[in-house]
Amino acid sequence: MKKAIAWGVGIVVGVPVVLAATAAILVNTIDQQALLNKASAVVKEKQQRDLAFTGPVQLKWFPSIGADLNGVTLSEFQSTDQFLKADKVSISLALLPLLSSEVVVDAVQASGVTVNVVKNAEGKFNFDDLSNPEKKDEPQAEPEPTQQAGEQALNFSVDSIALEKVNVTYTDNQTGLQASLNDFSMQSGRIEPGVPTDIALKGNVKANKPQADLNIDLNTRLEFGLGENLYANFENLKFAVLGQLDQQQADVNVQASTLNVNPKTLEVKAQSLDAKAKGQLPNVGAFDVSLNSPSLELSETVARGEAFNFKADLKQPTRSIKATIDLTGLQGNLKQAVSAALNTTVNLVEGERTVNLKLASPMSLNMKSQLIELAALTGQLDVKDPALPKKEASMPLAGRLVVNNTEKTAELDLNSKFEATSFDLKAAVKNFTKPAITAVLNADKLNIDALLPPKKAADSTNSGKPAETAKDTPVDLSPLRNLNLDITANIGELKVSNLQAQQVKTKAVARGGKLTISPLDAKLYGGSTKGVITADANTQTVTVNQNMTGVQVQPVIKALLDKDMVEGKGNVGINIRTTGNTVNQMKAALDGKVSVSLQDGAIKGINLAERFRNAKSLLSSGSNATQKTDSTQKTDFSSLAVSFDIANGVATSNDLSVMAPLFRIGGAGQVNLVKNSLDYLAKASVVATSTGQDGKTLDSGLNGVTVPVRLYGPFTGVQWELQFKELAKEAAKAKLQPKIDEKKEELKGKAEEKLKDAFKGFLNR
């Protein structure tokens, strides 16, 4: 913008002076062609550029000196390539005002102007030699002293400007930007600081970064100041931009009966301000925003206004968002503080879900410290969604928000109640460029499930067929690299994903690309859990170390996996680590150890005691019996202990130990998390007992027999196989064993008698 202003001032002030000087030379000679040749020679010698006049020249005399030039061309530095071309240029300069350090240009007219601006790879412009000509052979002048108070500054004035068919191209060889101003026209009255004038301009702008094709149209009455008194006052402002931006429609329209802006003091005064913009942008969607104020005045002495309204409407393929911001009752001033009543609304529609947010608060704005405070924030959050447990949810909000733009900090105190839940949140942000976020959440009860749609019910069909390979899901931890947060949460009762916990204490810290959740402690289903979870974006790894003590495991497994697999109370230890860029990669890289120790529970899916009671018919068939998992059946145990060593996504176990009323179970096998399947062989040894599970006795001839029981198949269809082929052999062996032992004793007795008889015969000899 500063460079653009410099160009403008150079054109409006510098060019007229140069051309007026040229006209002065022409006035003092009769041979105009000789003078034109002389001017071209001077430019060639001093600027090393070619200046040519291919059309007629009309001189102007006192009291204004100037010329009408036709067919003017100026080459590039040390080149014949064209830098500037003008079909017609007319300019005249008043002589007498120069005596009082004033430059008064009567009129500037130009048409058919073409200018080619180029920035080379070193960052130099192709006009630098014109604005800063090198004078290596001349001694360097001493810096001019700063203008003292009372000295008169050089003033300038242009009586009128009329430009038509002006075209400017810009090429930036550093960034690859190519832009152009096409068919630009401008008409104005007197251009002079402090003097109101009518201005009308329009043109077309094209660019490649971003791609743009925009038509610009401005009509207004303008008064402006420069230097230390920089300001701009617009009357009857009408500004419009229409075209394509990034291959999407863009439409901007600004109107105001008055709009006064002072960038130095930040003073703004507007009447009937109405600004609108609509279009469509990539990653944003279709947008329609507006800003209007019937009357607004902000200055060091006063702040007042009828209202200030902002509206935004955003439409995307899957959602729409509407937002409003209203400021009323402006008071105060910019020197101290501006106060107003703030009301804002946000409406989000996504599918069948509707979210409405309303916020209101007194607002205080301190321009000196750039401090914004919403001291008494109140509001309401309403959610309607058929997928919610109660179809809708409402949450009142209250708190305080402070934003300090000077220190780049923000603080939020927020409290709310939801059903039987009340919570208090204190959050702070430091450094808006790279935010460091801290927060403390305290809640007596927090039901996350009431705010989220329920999880889809798992497929309960037990097909026994191998599970289809699921589509892989990316795991992207890269957002952690830019995350700097420290969040502490203390929750009396928490429900999330159907898991219910009490006295939850946790802290999440993210720095340097690593997220650490420690501690992660809670009371859980009659017991407690303690642990640490980490996620590292630098190595794309996740670790979990969690220990549950005295916990009823059935509701935990049901909540997390939606499976009814085992009952019992005891301890669970989890120490695992994985890495990868997708879910399947992480499953394949999973390593670690899991251990389980339970008491007084049951294994869900089969009733081994019942199957053993009916073993006679199965034994007689001599074939294996296969049964699908049946959640209505279970096998009781007094204790269960097992551990799994996990490597490359496969969990291996060889230490199963189950104590049950009718049998003892050992076993070994694998759980393949990559293929979502298991293959485990348990061996149940039947013990002699009067009564077993359900108070029933076992009369199947299996006492002392070890029964092989195999669990296998995909997780979606686990099957139990009682291997009665082996069982029949074991049962027959067990049945014959007493007779074999009896025969052994009988043979042993007979052998002893024969030995005694033989020994007696030997002694009687």
Image: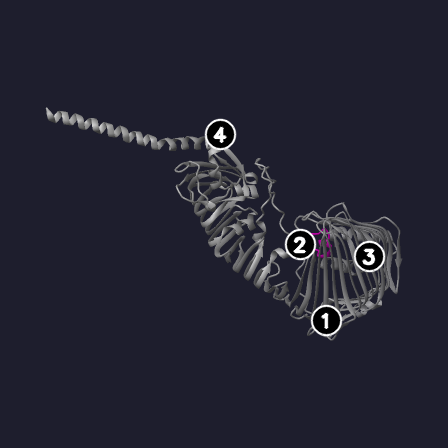
In the shown orientation, is residue 31 left or right of residue 596? right
- Residue at left offset 57%, top offset 52%: 480
**Tags 2 and 1 in contact by the CB under 8 Å rule?**
no
Q: Nearer the viewer, mark 3 or mark 2?
A: 2
Up the image or down, 147 lies above or below 594; here it is below
First reached walking from the N terminus: tag 4 or tag 2: 2
Q: Quadrant of the C terminus?
A: top left
**Disc 4 residue type (three-letter):** Ser
Q: Marks 1/3: CA distance? A: 31 Å
Q: Nearer the viewer, mark 4 or mark 1?
A: 4
Residue 435 appears anywhere in the view: no
Q: Which stretch appears magenta? A: 124-135
- Label 3 sits on a secondary structure element that is strand
**Disc 1 residue type (three-letter):** Ala
- Density class for disc 3 (Cα within 10 Å; few <14, some 14-19, many ≥20) is some
Up the image or down, 698 lies above or below 391; here it is above
The residue tagged 4 is: 621
Q: Quadrant of the N terminus?
A: bottom right
- Label 2 sits on a secondary structure element that is loop
The residue tagged 1 is: 340
First reached walking from the N terminus: tag 2 or tag 1: 1
First reached walking from the N terminus: tag 3 or tag 4: 3
- Label 1 sits on a secondary structure element that is strand
Q: Residue furthest left?
A: 765
The residue tagged 3 is: 240
The residue tagged 2 is: 388
First reached walking from the N terminus: tag 3 or tag 2: 3
Q: Marks 3/2: CA distance? A: 46 Å
